[in-house]
Image (cartoon, helix red, strand yellow):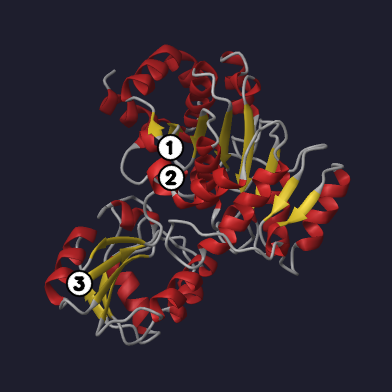
Amino acid sequence: MKYQQTLEWMFAQLPMYQREGKTAFKKDLTNILAFSEELNHPEKKFKTIHVGGTNGKGSTSHMIASVLQEAGYKVGLYTSPHLKNFTERIRINGKEIHKRTVTAFINKHKDFLEKQRLSFFEMTVGIAFHEFAKQKVDIAVIEVGLGGRLDSTNIITPEVSVITNIGLDHTQFLGETLPEIAFEKAGIIKKGIPVVIGERQVEVEEVFKKKAIEMNADISFASDDQQNYKTDLLGSYQKNNTKTAVSALKKLKGFQISEENIKNGLLNVVENTNLKGRWQILQENPKVICDTAHNKEGLQYVLEQLQKEQLERLHIVLGVVSDKNLDEILPMFPKKAHYYFCKPDIPRGLSATKLQDKAREYNLEGEVFNSVNQAYKKALRQANTKDLIYVGGSTFVVAEII
């Protein structure tokens, strides 16, 4: 199979969470353990840092990788979802793996994958671990896909575990309350392995402390660090992520990382890792900002920052996926903005008309468009040079315009 055929085959194997939602969620690690055995346990051949949490785990993973690169190490980085290209999910020193690597791997293991009925995500984790082992990375930063305890990445024994924070997201899989979600995320805490929690949250602190005692794991809270660090990632919300990244790096044993490496790594995240979609400024006059924030906690930070911008009129290109709790997020959006409602081009995207109807209940007014691109183009036409256009609501909306 050629590359495009390979991807189509992978996407079609089993419903994929990114596109389909709940039906793709796997309830145990049986498949990934079987695949690991088939691949001769690649995850045991390199060191790892495991990063979970509701918000900020992608940015934090990129920051950690960037600092380790500055310190001269060969660094694997596994993240999800991708914005433009599937290969973004698996990088070594910021470079995406080659399309040929994906095709060759799937062709070689296709019989096993079909027989075992692996999900898209399980296959992707297998490719990542196999490639990191083959390329002999010094360390890999592994971002949890969904939850933690039952996530396909959770077959590693990392040097450090990281949990950024807990918010109400993916409640249909992980639980309806913060403690229930924290329990799932705490599943990445391993015996005797230090764990860094990004933020102290009264509702869930005890969940983590209890799990850490049970696993005899040293636990620390990054938000206790009074120092602030500068980063090239825009967005005031990144200050929490920088503290989490630095705290995790300081728990890492056997690696030489200087203060200079930390400083330069945090200031060169985009250049070192090619991270996109985090308070990314796409143009000026009119200023266009996109951000992948898509749940209550993430959007709260982003919308607060929008209020600080100097602008005449605010235009918001908004699209969401169908499992979002709109009654939770829509009241946060500014009523004075003009909205361009659209549906991200994936099966679980919510229809733009339904979004408009719901938005009206909260006095958010705007037009409906057939695609993200149409909505974005109209916003660009309507905006004058002193206006601001914000594009967001979903990772998949941002993916269509960057």
Q: Nearer the viewer, residue 268 or 9?
A: 268
Circle 2 or circle 1, nearest the eye: 1
One can see residue 287 in this view:
yes
* Label 2 crowd (10 A; few <14 / some 14-19 / many >=20): some
Q: Secondary structure at mark 1?
A: helix
188 left or right, relative to 168:
right
| Left or right for 88, reference 251 | left
Q: Nearer the viewer, residue 134 or 246?
A: 246
Q: Which mark is residue 81?
A: 2
Q: Which residue is mark 1?
A: 89
Q: Residues within 10 Å of mark 1 (few under 14, many from 20)?
A: some
> Which type of secondary structure does the marked residue at label 2 adopt?
loop
Tell me which residue sits at (46%, 43%) in the image: 80
The circle drawn on residue 286 is: 3
Residue 56 is left or right of residue 365, and the answer is right
Q: How many marks?
A: 3
For residue 141, which numbered disc appears in the image? none
Q: CA distance from mark 2 to mark 1?
A: 7 Å
Q: Amino acid at mark 1?
A: Arg
- Identify which residue is drawn at 25% across, 83% down: 313
Amino acid identity at mark 2: Pro
> In the rendered image of this protein, does residue 109 appear above or below residue 132?
above
Mark in the foreground, 3 or 1: 3
Residue 333, image quadrant: bottom left
Could you tell me how far apart the alpha carbons at marks 2 and 3 are, in whole angstroms?
A: 29 Å
Please tell me which residue is depicted at 62% across the width and 57% down the height of the picture: 243
Give how far apart the Cα atoms at labels 3 and 1 are.
31 Å
- Give percent across and percent down for residue 331: 46, 81
Determine which quarter of the picture holds residue 89: top left
